[in-house]
Image (cartoon, grey):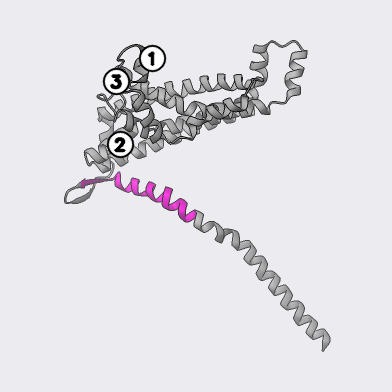
Amino acid sequence: MQSDVEGVLQSDDSTSERVLLWVDEQLKWLLTLPAVAILFALTFYPLLRALQMSTQQFLPTGTTFVGAENFVKLLSNETYHTSLLVTGKFILLAVGIEFLLGFAIALLLNKRLKFRGLWQTLILIPMILSPTVIGLIWRLLYTPDGLLDFLAGGNVGWISEPSMALYSVILTDVWQWTPLVVLVIFAGLQSIPSHVKEAAIMDGASPFQRFRDITLPYLSSLIVLVLIIRIVDALRVFAKVYILTRGGPGDSTNVISMEMYRTAFRFSSFGEASAMAISLLVIVLALAMTFVKTANIEFSS
């Protein structure tokens, strides 16, 4: 009789243990459901909605399915082509200057400077401000007879002259995002083992040789990472352009995101604007995949 009771108790214990193990195994999936729901609501649903809208034409009487017509229109849309060229010029100059300037500042900070902690803090301030605040600050600086005109010794027309407007937006972007490059590169410089640099010095390697053979190989993955982040983010620049120039004068600062805004909310062509958004997504994915592929080649060599 006692053995039967013990058998029943052991059976109950094993059943409870199996239930607890099953709950423990399934609980991780249940706990991720809220995050998955939020991700779907903020990412996948807007993407699916944009895909749907890109196949429609919006009329006062309703919507009409037009298939790929909105994408075909982009092929002959000269304003869209101009916005792509403006965006490409913005990315090339802004990201290039940010990378070179950020790399130089990081190399400088890596030396034993006085008050290095203070300089690091001051350098990072622009990065933590919102693009809207930065746009308002620089719009005040660019006003006629403002501080920058005083320093330049005359009325330059920073954001009113077509020849200057894009470079003024680039200057604002460089001021905001160079600290990101400094932060990433400086962290990489600090991670280089000191004994490697000391061995190179003892072997008689020059500063350029140490930079070429030690610093750059150690930083290659971080360089690719920061370039991907900045290029993808520069493709989506909007707030600074909207606050500073509204895409003008003319089309001199009409980047792709600004053209999407104009097409959707000024001309009420939501289908064509959605097609532009999908094309921008394709461009971003293509650039990201290209950089990742390049990075994998570098890592394997």
x and y percentages locating residue 30 in the rendered image? 55, 61
> On residue 260, which mark appears?
2
SS at badge 2: helix
Which quadrant is the C terminus positioned in?
Answer: top right
Q: Give 68 or 290, whichever is nearer the viewer.
A: 290
Task: Identify residue type, mark 3.
Answer: Pro
User: Residue 203 occupies which quadrant of the picture?
Assistant: top right
Residue 221 placement, left or right of 289: right
SS at badge 3: loop
Q: Which residue is mark 1?
A: 151
Q: Earlier in the sequence, mark 1 or mark 3?
A: 3
Residue 54 placement, left or right of 94: left
Mark 1–mark 2 Cα distance, whole angstroms, equals 36 Å
SS at badge 1: helix
x and y percentages locating residue 259 in the rendered image? 29, 33
Residue 236 shows up from this direction: no
The answer to whether the residues at label 1 and label 2 have Cβ atoms under 8 Å apart is no
Task: Identify residue type, mark 1.
Answer: Leu
- Inspect the magenta stretch and tell me whether residue 52 lies in it: yes
Q: Which residue is mark 3?
A: 144
Q: Earlier in the sequence, mark 1 or mark 2?
A: 1
Mark 2–mark 3 Cα distance, whole angstroms, equals 29 Å
Query: Over which residues does the magenta segment extend?
Result: 36-58
